[in-house]
Amino acid sequence: MNATLETLMYQLGQVFMFPVLAAVAVLFIYAFYALGAFAVQAWQRRGGMNAGPGFPLLAYARDNPGRSEDDLDVAAHKMMEHARIATRVAPMLGLVATMIPMGPALKSLADGNLASVSHNLTVAFSAVILALIAASITFWIVSVRRRWLAEEMAWLTAKRPVPAAAQAAPLAQGSAA
């Protein structure tokens, strides 16, 4: 009974190898997509654009007048949700992608099949490296965007004046408060 359970758990773990590797690849691609979007937003914020794509919370407040501070806070969290999830999920999937091939690698080592050990370890460590790179990129993006959104929230709640580069004609400083 114990051997059957162990075999079942081993086989079930192996089933997840492809989905986990696919998820790591998707997160890696997403990280670079998010990095490009972040670079564009940074350029828009420095380029003196109005309260448009470079200042998403100001644009949200302009398009939804009369929203409370709580509504603005929820909107700000929603704007960062995908990158925050990627930041947290990528390292976990990297660990899973490292651990799944370790079983076959150890079995191959016991059997003396060093080529299989090498293959499994290559997959394991490549997956965790890509996952950690994706997590690092998205963590940096989330950190800076959190500050940007906090600045916009402060401007909207009249704690600080809105800089000229962030102002749009239809947006008044206290319109969302």
Image (cartoon, rainbow, N blue to C red):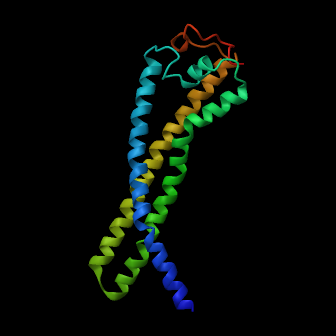
How many marks are shown on the rendered structure?
0
In the visual, does 42 lie left or right of 88?
left
Work out whether 19 lies above or below 44: below
Considering every residue shown, the one lying at the far bottom of the view is 1
Picture coordinates of residue 136, whole percent (x, y): 46, 46
- The residue lying furthest to the top in this view is 169
Q: Which quadrant, please, contains the N terminus?
A: bottom right
- Pick the residue in front: 48 or 85: 85
Residue lying at 41% horizontally and 30% vertically, measured from the top left: 39
Residue depicted at x 43% and y 48%: 134
Q: Which of the image's four quarters has the C terminus?
A: top right
Residue at the image point whose x is 54% and y is 32% from the top = 145
- Quarter-of-image position of residue 20: bottom left
Expressed as whole percent of the image width and height from the top left, the position of residue 172 reads 64, 10
Residue 99 spot, x, y in % from top left: 46, 70
Residue that appears at 48% across and 65% down:
96
Point out the residue furthest to the front here: 64
Residue 159, compared with residue 148, is above or below; it is: above
Q: Is residue 108 left or right of residue 157?
A: left
